[in-house]
Image: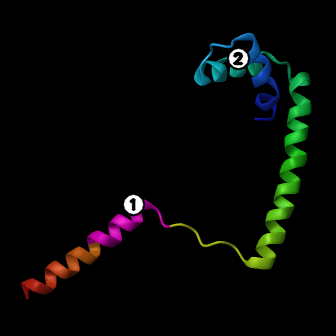
Amino acid sequence: MLFCSGERPKLKAQHPDATFGELGTLLGAAWKALSDEDKQPFVDDHAAKKKVADAKKKAYESEHGKPAKKEKKADKKKKKDASDDEEDGSDAE
């Protein structure tokens, strides 16, 4: 993403009629064409930004606690189906 944010404007100028998807394809090809040595500054930048973000997250969680996990759609459906079954079963008695 760091690579793309810098390269997208350049590619957009070279290919003004390219769609968003086409630009993505061009960006992917450009990234793939880079040597490991040329990719390294982006990898290092990512690692540094991740370290800062992780520290901010840890500080937030120590102050506010971890956020509750969202319930998955499949789990909601199972609960709904189970409660429907219980209601149906009580009418049959």
Disc marking residue 56: none
The relative height of residue 84 versus residue 8 in the rendered view (above or below) is below
Q: Is residue 69 left or right of residue 23?
A: left
Q: Position of residue 61 (x, y in %)?
A: 76, 72
Which residue in the rendered view is the most extreme toward the left? 92
Dot 1 amino acid type: Ala
Q: Position of residue 39 (x, y in %)?
A: 86, 27
**Which quarter of the image is occupied by the N terminus?**
top right
Q: Is residue 44 left or right of residue 88?
A: right
The relative height of residue 14 versus residue 56 in the rendered view (above or below) is above
Q: Position of residue 35 (x, y in %)?
A: 85, 19
Q: How many marks?
A: 2
Q: Residue at x 61, y 18 (%)?
A: 22
Q: Position of residue 23 (x, y in %)?
A: 66, 20
Q: Find the magenta span and give its range.
A: 71-81
Residue tagged 2: 29
Which residue in the rendered view is the most extreme toward the bottom? 93
Mark 1 and mark 2: span between their CA atoms?
A: 37 Å
**Which quarter of the image is occupied by the C terminus?**
bottom left
Task: Give whichever of 31, 37 is nearer the camera.
Answer: 31
Asked where in the image residue 42 lies, by quadrant, the reply is top right
Q: Residue at x 27, y 69 (%)?
A: 81
